[in-house]
Image (tube, helix red, strand yellow):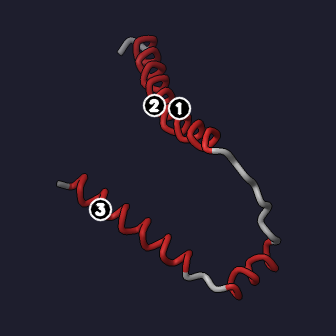
Amino acid sequence: MNGAILFAGIVAHTVFLVRQSRRETAAVAEEYDEAFGPSPARESSWAVNVALVVLGLTLPVLGARWLVAAAVDLAEALGW
């Protein structure tokens, strides 16, 4: 039940942020461009985006496994 509540909160927050960003006026966008400069137009393909998502999901899992393996090795080396 807690997971469902957390997931619903994440979805609600994401929907809120998307709706707020779409309400941005031209004046706000112009002010942002004056302060930070125009954002560079970058085009990326679906393949690049999919690869980045796969990497983003895979690397934390691998990193966690490496962390646990290193902790076990350290504990065994210390005699625990």
Q: Is residue 44 above or below residue 11?
A: above
Q: Secondary structure at mark 1?
A: helix
How many marks are shown on the rendered structure?
A: 3
Please report the residue visible at 46 percent of the width from the left and 17 percent of the height from the top.
74
**Relative depth, front residue between 72 and 2:** 2
- Say what secondary structure mark 2 lies in: helix
Task: Identify whether 69 is placed above or below 2.
Answer: above
Image coordinates for residue 6, horizontal then vertical, percent: 29, 58
Q: Three-letter amino acid code at disc 1?
A: Leu
Q: Could you tell whether 80 is left or right of 56 in the image? A: left
Estimate the x, y position of residue 61 in percent, counting from the top left.
45, 31
Q: Nearer the viewer, residue 62 or 12?
A: 12
Q: Which residue is mark 3?
A: 8
Instruction: Check if mark 1's residue and mark 2's residue have beta carbons within 8 Å.
Output: yes
Residue lying at 79% horizontally and 72% vertically, measured from the top left = 36
Instruction: Determine the secondary structure under disc 3.
Output: helix
| Structural distance between the alpha carbons of marks 1 and 2 | 5 Å
Residue drawn where x is 17% and y is 54% of the image: 1
**Which of marks 3 and 2 precedes in the sequence?**
3
From the viewer's perspective, is residue 61 above or below residue 79?
below
Query: Position of 44 compared to 1: left or right?
Result: right
**Quarter of the image that includes the C terminus:** top left
Pointer 2 residue: 61
Q: Is residue 47 left or right of residue 73?
A: right
Q: Nearer the viewer, mark 3 or mark 1?
A: 3
Q: Which residue is mark 1?
A: 59
Tell me residue 19's x, y (percent): 48, 76
Residue toward you, 9 or 80: 9
